Image (spheres, coloured by chain):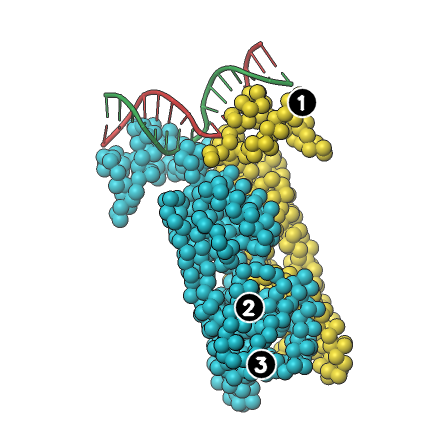
Chain colours: A cyan, B yellow, C red, D green
Amino acid sequence: MKPVTIKDVAQEAGVSTTLVSRVLNAEMDEQGRPVCAVNKATAARIMEVVNRLGYRPNTAAASLRKKRGNRIGVILPDLSHHFFALMARQFEMMARQNGYTVLFGSSGDMPDRIDNLAATFLQDNADGIILIPGIGCREVVESIVRRRIPLTLVVRDIPGLEQVGRVLTDNAAGTKLALDHLIGQGFQKIEMISSTLRISNNEERERLYEAYMAEAGRESRILHCDHTRPQESMTFILEDAMRRGVDAFYCPNSSLPLFCARACAGANISIPDDLAVMGYDGGDIFDITTPTITQISYSMKEVAEEAFRVLTARIQDFSMKPMRVVVPPSLKVGGSTQKAASVQGTSDSSDKPVRQLREAVRMLQDLEPFLQNK
Amino acid sequence: MKPVTIKDVAQEAGVSTTLVSRVLNAEMDEQGRPVCAVNKATAARIMEVVNRLGYRPNTAAASLRKKRGNRIGVILPDLSHHFFALMARQFEMMARQNGYTVLFGSSGDMPDRIDNLAATFLQDNADGIILIPGIGCREVVESIVRRRIPLTLVVRDIPGLEQVGRVLTDNAAGTKLALDHLIGQGFQKIEMISSTLRISNNEERERLYEAYMAEAGRESRILHCDHTRPQESMTFILEDAMRRGVDAFYCPNSSLPLFCARACAGANISIPDDLAVMGYDGGDIFDITTPTITQISYSMKEVAEEAFRVLTARIQDFSMKPMRVVVPPSLKVGGSTQKAASVQGTSDSSDKPVRQLREAVRMLQDLEPFLQNK
DNA sequence: GTGAAAGCGCTAACAG
DNA sequence: CTGTTAGCGCTTTCAC
């Protein structure tokens, strides 16, 4: 009925609680046996009792005693957003592999929520914090740093801060991949739709787009979709753009292409025949639209791995200068930037059912991640 | 540098730690003042010190002492799946409102992972567990129940179990809504595509579909998409169905319609003109496809609220018989079940840009939840 | 190689 | 109304 404690184990094994604790906390060698200064035989006996009794150490007691809880707090804008949900999942896996527990919190990009969550996590004995910062949270981040809490920023940056780890993405390389691709596909008038939300990535990707275009000797133009009323905003942007003969839109995030596609559908603009659309950081979500959306992305697994590495390094040795890691992007070509003729063969394959089937199968493979039921 | 403890507060306020603890744990009345047997003046003084020193009680210590941690563990199949991500977010909000903390874990629908997660959460002083069960986990669930842990099943059921709370959805009402709609739209040959995954919802919805069709004096037919190779499976299902003149597919979950749409795109089958598609539990995800997918859904907020209510009731009084709540479904009509002419007015609106714009704006409003940047 | 004892920060009796 | 005391279950000196 009541949980078995370390005392029970000690008694049953005829040793002191000290020894049990030692064995349980010992590093394990490759044979899975404790590698500490304990008699092999007693150690084995203790382990046997532990298993037999199904003993599970009480986390609260342990974390009260040592001053750390083997937890890390993850603060992200919104746990329900597909991008962060995927990230959360990766963190969860990393944590489990490394014997950590993750505490999640959605900040809604609000500085005071971040502050609050951080406080809660620390109260909960979190050893460190991973944060996806938003706009205007420099102050709160500084206050966390001042408390000497290991902190790692992920995916978005706050420039100039010392004493924080960073795992960022290579926006320069990403921009180049994106625009090389669009130009390679023969698009002439490539404009950018960014957001009025002043996230670091948006800003940086805007700058890089302009720099690239300038160097390529092309005209550049950035439209800003009002993030408070994206629907209307996007519709008007499209209207105007079509009139000006834009043939490709490059968007620096994963929401804008979806809005764009929706607006196109409503306005009888065909993607990619009338207009190509390219996104960023879309993950699987860009594979469920028709056509699929070409994007720059990076491995979320890699991001999570690095974030974990950077954070735990800092947890283990706070005096160490925190690392800064940059994750490489890759281009994932979808249907939204390839003229139909060259890919789907609308007229070409309509009389070749087998080919058609093959095609379908290939497209469906992209969807694999969505396989799960419900 | 080092955290301020209750002792510091007591000393500074010139009282005993007991009193501080009492004040802090007291119920607050509407004025936000403690309503316990403590001198108003001292209470106020204590609160002042608490705030001035920025005291935060140590969760580990508190939860070691009382035998509960004000946490609940939430075990769901996959935190990264849009459906569960949304659910997780709702739980997070509910928890915060009620002064709880949530621990999340993805089970991958594997019984031993569920077991493991439950054990971890209990170790962590979780007061109760919310579980979305999968196939073959009846045994592990029974073992949790046996340990007398408050447990609430959400969205999926394991029939016959005593002593577990339940928050389920009204599949009968949902099925009726779905099929009434399809029939109302004039579709003649309505078949069902289900999954080979034997989740309770799939099974129940299959039965209900057949019962409905029988009663309506219509032919029924259930195709099973192989969940291990959905792409191929779906393609073959479609091929065959088109040959047989099926004009509407009803799917009992949120993955199948996406596969279906994808396969249709690959096979030059137009939705909804050649084939209507209807899904279940799609949430926002059905709004980003073109056309949007008609679905039966329910308020995730409501589900989370109820789950919380059911669980906390049980936590507060374990002797009470756990509740069983059924959440009502609703029909959300998208473009996938409405013939183009009646909605988008392909030819009708092509020469009326204003109307077209309106249309687009309306469609985009559905996308609002995706507003967030990145 | 092993154990006794102290105590992490907090709360719950029990007295006053 | 308030304080004293005794632990919750675990880890960690320190001594043997």
A10 displayed left or right of B143: left
Residue D3 or A146: which is nearer the viewer? Answer: A146
Percent position of residue A166, x then y? 45, 55
- Report helix, strand or loop for mark 1: helix
Q: CA distance from mark 3 to mark 2?
A: 16 Å
**Residue located 70% across and 73% down the image:** A236
- Report helix, strand or loop for mark 2: helix
Local packing at callout 3 (Cα closer than 10 Å; few below 14, some 14-19, many 20+) is some
Which dot marks residue B41?
1
Local packing at callout 2 (Cα closer than 10 Å; few below 14, some 14-19, many 20+) is many
**Residue located 44% across and 33% down the image:** A64
Query: Which of the chains bears the disc numbered 3?
Result: A
Residue B79 position (above or below residue B285)? above
Query: Which of the chains bears the disc numbered 1?
Result: B
Residue B207 position (above or below residue B110)? below
Q: CA distance from mark 3 to mark 1?
A: 72 Å
Q: CA distance from mark 1 to mark 2?
A: 58 Å
Query: Which of the chains bears the disc numbered 2?
Result: A
Which dot marks residue A189?
3
Q: Which label lies toward us, 1 or 2?
A: 2
Q: Are marks 3 and 2 on the same chain?
A: yes
Residue B41 or C12: which is nearer the viewer? Answer: B41
Earlier sequence position, callout 3 versus callout 2? 3
Q: In the image, what residue type sits under mark 2?
A: Glu
Which dot marks residue A206?
2
Q: In the image, what residue type sits under mark 3?
A: Lys
Does the image show residue A28? yes
A201 displayed left or right of A61: right
Which dot marks residue A273?
none
**Do the residues bearing badges 3 and 2 touch, measured as CB atoms within 8 Å?**
no
Percent position of residue A310, x then y? 40, 52
**Residue located 51% across and 86% down the image:** A342
